[in-house]
Image (cartoon, grey):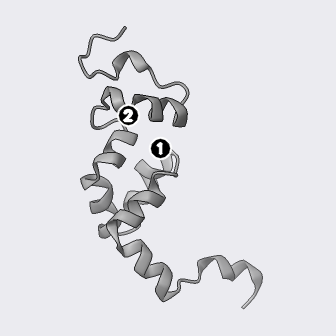
């Protein structure tokens, strides 16, 4: 095995961590939106289910409204986030 193959090796510990929805969610929250939306949901049915059922991931993808208490976190993660919409009223600023 050469060095280029080392990144695709899956260990039982890695598989176990990625099978726990809460841990997978925590990892996926650090992935950019495009990768999360387009690629991560295609990895497996389990990943797709975690992404579609996770409130935090749905908010990160802007499929679910973000409330005032979370707006600062999203502004930090995505600087272009429009805080005027964080109250979910749909009225903007």
The numbered mark at residue 82 is none
- Quarter of the rendering containing residue 17: bottom left
Write the residue at 46% across / 29% down. Answer: 72
The residue lying furthest to the bottom in this view is 1
Q: What is the secondary structure assignment of the residue under circle 1? A: helix
The image shows residue 26 at horizontal and vertical percentages of: 43, 58
Q: What is the secondary structure assignment of the residue under circle 2? A: helix
The image shows residue 63 at horizontal and vertical percentages of: 30, 38
From the viewer's side, name the closer residue of 52 and 21: 21
From the viewer's side, name the closer residue of 23 and 50: 23
Dot 2 alpha-carbon crowd within 10 angstroms: few under 14, some 14 to 19, many 20 or more = few
Q: How many marks?
A: 2
The image shows residue 21 at horizontal and vertical percentages of: 33, 66
From the viewer's side, name the closer residue of 78 and 67: 67
Dot 1 alpha-carbon crowd within 10 angstroms: few under 14, some 14 to 19, many 20 or more = some
Write the residue at 37% across / 8% down. Answer: 93
Q: Which residue is mark 1?
A: 33
Report if the CB atoms under discs 1 and 2 are less than 8 Å apart. no
Above or below, 4 against 81 in this view is: below
The residue lying furthest to the top in this view is 93
44 with respect to 31 (left or right):
left
Q: CA distance from mark 1 to mark 2?
A: 17 Å
Q: Quadrant of the N terminus?
A: bottom right
Whichever of callouts 1 and 2 sits on the residue coming sooner in the sequence is: 1
- Quarter of the rendering containing residue 28: bottom left
The numbered mark at residue 70 is 2
């Amino acid at each position: 095995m050469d060095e280029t193959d080392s990144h695709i090796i899956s260990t039982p510990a890695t598989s176990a961590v990625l099978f726990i929805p809460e841990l997978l969610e925590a990892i996926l929250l650090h992935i950019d939106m495009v990768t999360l939306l387009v690629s991560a949901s295609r990895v497996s049915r389990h990943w797709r289910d975690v992404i579609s059922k996770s409130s935090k991931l749905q908010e990160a993808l802007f499929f679910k409204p973000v409330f005032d208490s979370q707006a600062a976190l999203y502004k930090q993660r995505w600087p272009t986030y429009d805080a005027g919409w964080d109250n979910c009223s749909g009225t903007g600023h």
